[in-house]
Amino acid sequence: AELYRVDAWGAPYFSVNSSGNIAVHPHGDGTLPFQQIDLLKVVRKVTESKSLGGLGLQLPLVVRFPDVLKHRLESLNLAFERAVASLDYDSHYQGVYPVKCNQDRFVVEDIVKFGQRFRFGLEAGSKPELLLAMSCLCAGSPDALLVCNGFKDAEYLTLALIGKKLALNTVIVLEQEEEVDLLIDLSRKVSVKPVIGLRAKLRTKHSGHFGSTSGEKGKFGLTTSQILRVVRKLEQAGMLDCLQLLHFHIGSQIPSTDLLSDGASEAAQIYCELVRLGANMQVVDIGGGLGIDYDGSKSCESDLSVAYGLEEYATAVVRAVRDVCDRKAVRHPVICSESGRAIVSHHSVLIFEAVAAHAVKSSFDSQVFVEGLCVDAREEYDKVYSAVVCGDYEKSLAYCDQLKQRCVEQFKNGSLGMEQLAAVDGFCEMVYGSVGAPEPLRTYNVNLSVFTSIPDFWGIDQLFPIVPIHRLDERPGVKGILSDLTCDSDGKIDKFIGGEGSLPLHETEGGEPGKYYLGMFLGGAYEEALGGLHNLFGGPSVVRVSQSDGPHSFAVTRAVPGPSCSDVLRAMQHEPMLMFQTLKHRAEECGEKTSLASIDAIAIANGLERSFNSMPYLVSSASFCFSD
Ligand code: PLP
């Protein structure tokens, strides 16, 4: 556990149990020992064939824990409730979940359900997100906010106005100045009095990667002059009372509470100014940015961690808003946040298999080796030999490199054969071993696409904790990097939390073949929505696992296989049914022409059908049969 820092990044949801497996604590600190879920048992249950009582799903697999989602939501609300009470704040907290972080139907429905008692709402940033938020919130608290962010056209605005007509607590947040004219016009046409918000472009700048859109030159929001023009336009239209919310978002992963307080104070000043200008202000919406400690370092030095917890976050916000409003004698507003990462990151774990581990291994044949070496190469060989005899580690390695270089030159000009070149590699490896050079990194091939399942690693160098989910009571003997299934040199993971260029891993040889399971944790936000279809590897299988008081401490409440080859082909406009018919017809033709008994058109059709219906990922040879 220490080697992988599980306690640092995983608390209070993940730990290592006495069997050396990752244990999930679905209710955080409140989880009783018998309620802990052994992740390996879940994987076994889900992947075992149906005939053996399993669910027969293929990896990679996302395991969702709705109990964790509930706990996150409760903890966030509790943190604000405590801050409000302890700081004598005269209003309340009422958050929304930005659906872009994970739009999965069951995730959003769970959040609405668990959030009902907190009047928790949703935030949408596009038309389809608004449609899903509207429909999901029909089951939510009537007071829950529906915050409409993002760039808007007439269709988006009309949809949001329909939301208001449907008695959803819809707030249209103006992201650009032009949106106000369109909104005034449409609200008259649709005869709806909208609740309007403004997104302010704050001067406070978050300097990390996620803050690149904050500050005066940021991509989003209205500048001070634009805000004043919008206020004037609303006043002229007799709609200034519609302006009720001020929103800002200084970026995800806000590193420190100092920066947060700075941003919240600036926003509170704007809020008070809007009150002074006659708007009917009710809510300060502080956006997202509540960070996650991906590497367990609890520091604000990198984008991978933050130096605060939920309590400190809530206290900083409530205090900053209260202090500004008190100075200006303005009634305390409702505080809304749009925390996404902090709500959904922990609730899902991606499980994948390491299918093979390769170290470059060559064999050394002394007979072959000496034959045919040119004079230069022989000289280098002699130097290596003397350096080894003297125990000079550095020189041995340097001369080995030179020897290899000479021999490769010889191979390229045709004067050295392949057997000899291989023998030189073997000789050098033997030298590395004898002088105690560190073992080269092992490459573990993983049954996964980085582009589909961990796109932020490829796109923005985001690191997530990756850990074997079992064998954690054995000291791992190897250092490895992970290479995915795509035919792309970027499809590898060679950076890990803690600044490491390799991951401690166990030998896979000798264990159950193909049964070395790795988990990627804290990836419940953004990764699923951003993933692509590189090499046509689709998404993983998904299961929902709840804590249960039955004999296994868990129950799988939903299991969905990942997209099949047909599904991913369809996504690229291919027609799998037609493709199948074409290939089947071809098999029949080949059978007729060749009249070879070996061309069994039926077996081929079955094989093809199976390929179209299965997931694109590797299937172990044990479970594959061509003519099934
Ligand atoms: N609100 C807005 C407007 C955003 O752009 C984002 C994401 O960047 C969020 C909320 C969610 O932020 P986070 O995931 O950091 O909570």
Image (cartoon, rainbow, N blue to C red):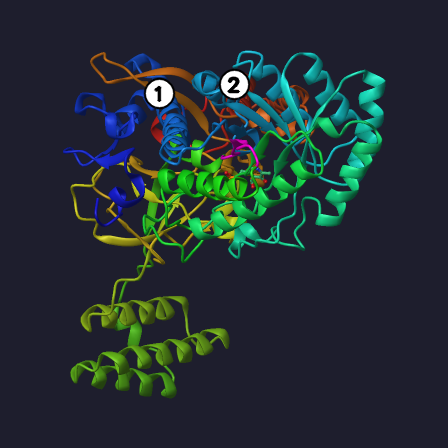
**Magenta span main SS:** loop
Image quarter where ligand 1 lies = top right
Question: Foreground: 162 or 103?
Answer: 162
Q: Earlier in the sequence, mark 1 or mark 2?
A: 1
Residue depicted at 21% across the width and 52% down the height: 477
Q: Position of residue 506 (x, y in %)?
A: 24, 46
Q: Quadrant of residue 299?
A: bottom left
Check whether the beta carbons of the residues at disc 1 and disc 2 lie within 8 A of each other.
no
Let me know if residue 470 is in the magenta part: no
Residue position for label 2: 606
The residue labelled by disc 1 is: 545
Task: Estimate the x, y position of residue 455 in percent, counting from the top left.
Answer: 52, 43
Q: How far apart are marks 1 and 2 (CA)?
A: 34 Å
- How many numbered circles are shown? 2
- Which stretch is magenta? 330-339
Quadrant for residue 278, please give it. top right
Whether 71 is drawn above or below 271: the answer is above
Q: What residue type is labelled 1?
A: Val
Q: Is residue 416 visible?
A: yes
- Between 336 and 166, the one lying in front of the other is 336
Tag 2: amino acid: Asn
Label 2 environment density (alpha carbons within 10 Å; few <14, some 14–19, many ≥20): some
Q: Position of residue 456 (x, y in %)?
A: 51, 45
Front residue (pair 390, 40): 40
Quarter of the image with the C terminus is top left
| 10 Å crowding of disc 1: few (<14), some (14-19), many (20+) | many
Q: Quadrant of the N terminus?
A: top left
